[in-house]
Image (cartoon, rainbow, N blue to C red):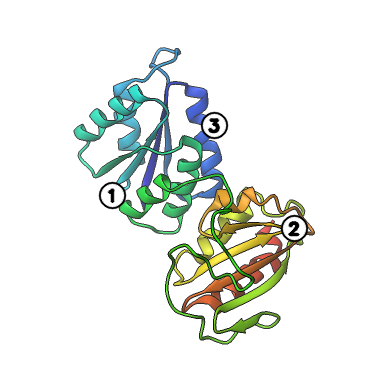
Amino acid sequence: MIGLVVVSHSRALADGVVELAGQMAPDVRIVAAGGDGSGGLGTDFAAVAEAISGADSGGGVVVLFDLGSAKMVADMAAEESAGEVVVVDAPLVEGAVAAAVAAQGGADLRRVADAARSASGRTDRSARTDRSGETGQPGRSGAGSASAPAGAESSVDGVRAEVVLTNGMGLHARPAALVVRSLAELDARVVVRFGDERADAASVLALMGLGAPGGATVEVSATGPDAAEAVRRVRELAGRDFDE
């Protein structure tokens, strides 16, 4: 499994990001490397190198950083590492969460790094999505040819269903992470709609950004060969209150 390192000028900030990302990915090694090594603000080469070593379980490590000089230290530590290390320029919090979820789902080093780079905390307002879930953005091809799960609607454009969030907090961090992980292996493009907002179900932060509370009804739409299975999995998660 891919490991993560969070490099920050602030020890408290690095620890906080690690704590948050760890809630989404309990099996991923995520290590903080914050501060100048003597309790002040800054970065420390030895601490970053040690964090990379501690995060590496054999599959490689993705390193995220907060400010420019932290990148310089991270790059130097990556060059000295015996393992495969990718230093990613991405939003620190959003990138760490996205990378952690991808790693938890078994993604390889490149895909984990790509997840961090593409992280965004906003819902996908730019996607022109109709009621069937078809978007103007690139996605996997192919309409859902499998039978729709009970309570869902199927058409040549895909599968969609209304899902009630019966858990107390709705689509907050952990339920959103469960949705992303459950869909990661499927060949389907999944969009979740709440009110006038929509989110790509491949993004934890986009799902959280919907602000869908407990008791709300969301629409889940999917296209692609595994569309029916994708909708079924989301409904199943909601039906068991996202294990909360």
Q: Residues within 10 Å of mark 1 (few under 14, many from 20)?
A: few
Q: Is residue 213 above or below residue 238?
A: above
Q: Amino acid at mark 1?
A: Gly
Q: Where, by quadrant of the figure, is residue 47 drawn?
A: top left
Q: Residues within 10 Å of mark 3 (few under 14, many from 20)?
A: some
Disc 3: which residue: 16
Disc 1: which residue: 58
Q: Quadrant of the C terminus?
A: bottom right
Residue 187 spot, x, y in % from top left: 44, 72
The reply, left or right, for residue 95 in relation to residue 236 is left
Q: Amino acid at mark 3?
A: Gly
Disc 2: which residue: 167
Residue located 58% across and 53% down the image: 125
Q: Which numbered dot is residue 198?
A: none
User: Which of the two labelled residues, at mark 1 and mark 3, occupies the earlier sequence position?
Assistant: 3
Residue 181 spot, x, y in % from top left: 51, 60
Q: Amino acid at mark 2?
A: Asn
Residue located 40% across and 12% down the image: 38
Q: Secondary structure at mark 1?
A: loop
**Label 2 vs label 3: CA separation?**
26 Å
